[in-house]
Amino acid sequence: MVSDFYPPIIGGMERHVSLLAKALADRGHEVIVCTMRRERFRKVGERHGVKIVRLDDFLQKIPFLFKGVKKKYPPLIN
């Protein structure tokens, strides 16, 4: 699965993806969620039987693009 954000980040989309991933894992599926990396979280982890891979985004490293923003959303692609 791919999601912009994932718990412990709080939000509706984050909760939905988390519940869906957990439900699939509970049914015996191998579930890997790829999401954007946050500084305070490890790059690879596991939660409720779901493997979480947090990927670095090149644009997150450009400070003036996200000045004072808590959630650094991925860029829009046309």
Image (cartoon, rainbow, N blue to C red):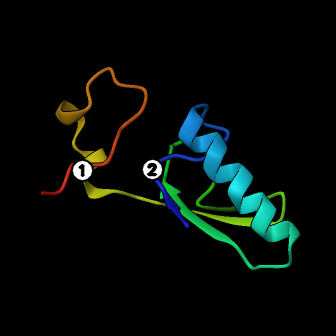
Q: Which residue is drawn at 32% across and 20% down?
A: 68
Which dot marks residue 4? 2
Can you name the residue that lies furthest to the left here? 78
Quarter of the figure with the N terminus:
bottom right
Residue 60 is situated, as x and y percent measured from the top left of the image, at: 31, 46
Q: How far apart are marks 1 and 2 (CA)?
A: 14 Å
Which secondary structure lies at badge 2? loop
Q: Nearer the viewer, residue 40 or 23?
A: 23
User: Which of the 4 quarters of the picture holds residue 45?
Assistant: bottom right
Q: Is residue 46 visible?
A: no
Mark 1 vs 2: CB contact within 8 A: no
Which dot marks residue 59? 1
Numbered-mark total: 2
Q: Which residue is drawn at 51% across and 43% down?
A: 39
Against 6, residue 22 (above or below) is: below
- For marks 1 and 2, give the one nearer the viewer: 2
Against 72, residue 47 (above or below) is: below
Which dot marks residue 28? none
Q: Residues within 10 Å of mark 2 (few under 14, many from 20)?
A: some
Q: Please, what is the three-letter code of the amino acid marked with disc 1?
A: Leu
Left-right relation of 21 to 4: right
Against 57, residue 41 (above or below) is: above
Quarter of the figure with the C terminus:
bottom left
Q: Please, what is the three-letter code of the amino acid marked with disc 2?
A: Asp
Left-right relation of 59 to 3: left
Q: Which residue is drawn at 31% across and 48% down?
A: 74
Can you name the residue that lies furthest to the top here? 68
Residue 43 is situated, as x and y percent measured from the top left of the image, at: 58, 60
Sequence order check: which comes first, mark 1 or mark 2? Answer: 2
Which secondary structure lies at badge 1? helix
Residue 13 is situated, as x and y percent measured from the top left of the image, at: 54, 41
